[in-house]
Image (cartoon, rainbow, N blue to C red):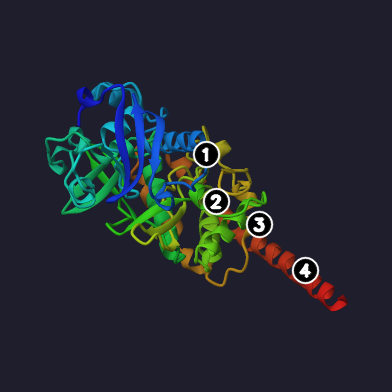
Amino acid sequence: MNTSQLSNNDYFILKHKNINVADIIIENGDITDVINIYEPEHLPYKYVDDKSKNITLLNSWVEHRGIPFSREDYDAIMEEFNVSSSKELTVLSYGLNLTDHYWLCEKNNEKKWEDVNFIDNNFSARIGKIMPELAEKYQDFINPDLSSNGRLKKYWIINNGKRELCKAGSGDLKQEPFNEFIASQIADRLNIDHVNYELKKHNDEIYCKCGCMIDKNVEFVNAFSVYLEGEKTGDKYNDYLNACSKMGINNAREDVDKMIVLDYLIRNTDRHVGNFGILRNSETLKWEKIAPVFDNGNSLWHNAQGVQFINSNSKSECRSFTGENEKNILLVGGTPWLDKSKLKGIDKIITDAFILNRNIENERVDKIVSEFQKRVNNLDIVLERNRETENRQTQSIERKGKSW
């Protein structure tokens, strides 16, 4: 499909692999009508028996599927593909991505999932403009770059048959790729299930790259959709864990707590309901497990405008449960899995990584290392306080039980 093929009023089928989920009308990238819903359990959100709400939810799904307006190369992409919005671009690229198995198929089009998905099929690589030796050219313009959310420049490539995501840094410091690598090293040492990030240098620019965490049978469902499966009490942490339990993931708390601990240590300011969640089988809809931790670039004081603002005690935003990493850490229960001795020598790994970034001065590197170590040291105090609180609550419940 190309821009000349998208009319003002097009009839599409929303598909989950080869399952027809819904018939929809799309006008200039906007879903204006939902004609039929065939498989409500396969919708990318929890079904509601209200046509206007289904239209709203599907539009929100398409919008969050595309590149955001804050993306650094947003205008260049819009101009390159001659479209006026990322939603229009999403429709033009069949709504395909490398996160899940949903796509948009034109009515009366006989293409199947096997014909179009990015897991099995080659795709045009926009990274060819930057790393031409890694990019293969294909006639069709669609590629997963056009449906990869997030504000950073990013490019999918096919490297020896593997799908890999490369992400650049932003601003003057371009610190995010290094943070991804460092977070990956910390998670590896603490036995936290995570997507592995490596650093790659090309033409004096350094990117981080990682593999794809889905395959032809397993897809990612973000936390926003997980929340919709459970009851809403206002306690986001327990609502999330209860939703996971309801869907058969009974060991969710430890995995979620590991993510919270990692975010606290690295001071991740971008953990939101779109970048954590679960993995599920797209055929059976069985929830498999908590997804590995990924997307950790906005961390380690990446946006501090001077070394004087790099402080271990400063509050850090976190949009997953409470709004702050320093409040999230208070939710964590028992941590028999945590062995801080495995972080010995991590300061050298942090230093060695940042030395590769010519935009970061040594003074900043030293301050990040020292303040990170303070957060590591403070972790024991916080977790011990949590254990004391939980013990008091348990004892109170036991006393009440005896009084009955």
Where is residue 95 drawn, in percent x and y? 31, 39
Q: Mark 3 is on which residue type?
A: Leu
Disc 3 from disc 2: Cα separation:
21 Å
Label for residue 197? none
Where is residue 347 drawn, in percent x and y? 45, 56
Residue with the mark numbered 3 = 330
Disc 2 from disc 1: Cα separation:
19 Å
Say whether marks 2 and 4 touch (CB < 8 Å).
no
| N-term mark: 4 or 3 | 3
- Who is closer to the viewer here, 366 or 69? 69
| N-term mark: 2 or 4 | 2
Mark 3 crowd level (few <14, some 14–19, many ≥20, 10 Å Cα): some
Looking at the rendered image, the quarter that the N terminus falls into is: top left
Where disc 2 sits, the SS reads helix
Label for residue 50? 1
Label for residue 227? 2
Disc 4 from disc 3: Cα separation:
15 Å
Residue 171 in view here = no
Say whether marks 4 and 1 touch (CB < 8 Å).
no
Tell us which disc is closer to us: 3 or 2: 2
Q: State whether residue 273 is above or below residue 250.
A: above
Where disc 3 sits, the SS reads helix
Say whether marks 1 and 3 touch (CB < 8 Å).
no
Q: Mark 1 is on which residue type?
A: Asp
Residue 214 in view here = yes
| N-term mark: 4 or 1 | 1
Residue with the mark numbered 4 = 392
Q: Mark 4 is on which residue type?
A: Arg
| N-term mark: 3 or 2 | 2
Q: Disc count in the image?
A: 4
Disc 4 from disc 1: Cα separation:
46 Å
